[in-house]
Amino acid sequence: MKVSVLVPVYGVEKYIRRCVESLFNQTYADLEFVFVDDCSPDRSIDILRSVMAERPERAGQVRLIRNPSNQGIGAVRQTLIDECTGDCLTFVDSDDYLPPRAVELLCAEMERSGADMVDGGWQRVTRSGAGGVNKPFQDGDERRYLSLLLCQNLVSNRMWGRLYRRRLFTDHGIRLARGVDFCEDYSVMTRLMFYARRSFINDPVYFYSDENATSYTHTTSPRHVRSFLRSNAIVLGFFTANDTRSRYLTPLQIGMTNVLRTVRANGFSLAEADSLLKYTPRGAVFRLLAALFRGKCPQAIAEKLYLAVRKTYVTFSK
């Protein structure tokens, strides 16, 4: 089973050596490493090439693609998927890194379980070192997992630290959108889980670096909010078209209400948000919640009611 390790590269000269060395030190043999240089303005690619020169035995497994212009993370991830040739794929951000047996452990569980996706444990890395292991969601019920994903902020929607069968993307036409460079994980993971059989292991398979102050997770701007809205619009459109039995209507609406909540909390234009999201609530409860977040009701009151609705759904949907 060939595995493609997919790595976007942009502005990570402080971290990329650690990342690439961890990839080249993987114990799993049948690997392909695909790097996309998104016009990185620093020495990231020079450092990548120097590590490649130090490890000539990996040369035949490496592909380095350069974008003609900066595309953003959503487009880069899609290029990586389009260009890879593995039976399976995994995403690694170039300021993060892997323990040596990461791919081996994920592949072993995929072969054992026959799953389409295997989720692993991960550790956060700060300047003080690596923290404890964050275990993946432990419930094997795919429908419940997807419901909690759609609710937002309850289970992780990260794309990294997982192994996927490539056909899960290609057979269902699940693609990342150019311009969705923040919250792109949510737009992908929810659609994948509509089709996927999921398994998990608790072993740590990913070191997530919280050291890079320039990463997307450390910044919030109107551009990020617009990306967040576009990501949610993709999810809303997908489930409106494909969830014909409305199995996920309630958690989807809880998620869309959270979008309105987030927009208002960030002081973003609700009129612009509505034009990008195009969400029409269904049912008295969700019409009320939308009206509260769109209107002049104090944020704290709207929040309290929203959280009560979400808690009630999570409690009684088990």
Image (cartoon, rainbow, N blue to C red):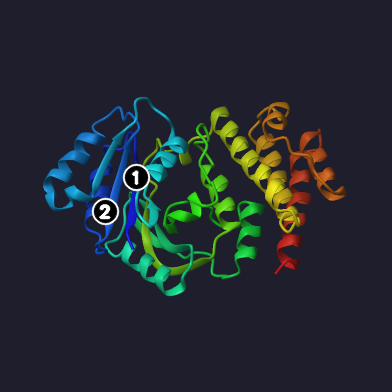
- Residue name at image x 70 percent, y 44 percent: 256
Residue type indicated by callout 2: Leu
Residue for badge 1: 7
Instruction: Judge whether residue 169 can be spotted in this image.
Output: yes
**Residue 89 appears at what percent x and percent y?**
39, 54
Give the secondary structure at mark 1. Answer: strand
Specify the quadrant of the image occupied by residue 257: top right
Is 241 above or below relative to 116? Answer: above
**Residue 198 appears at what percent x and percent y?**
52, 65
- Residue name at image x 17 percent, y 45 percent: 52
Q: CA distance from mark 1 to mark 2?
A: 10 Å
Give the secondary structure at mark 2. Answer: helix
Q: Among all residues in the image, which is located at the extreme bottom?
A: 112
Specify the quadrant of the image occupied by residue 26: bottom left
**In-front residue for pair 276/258:** 276
**81 to the left or right of 199:** left
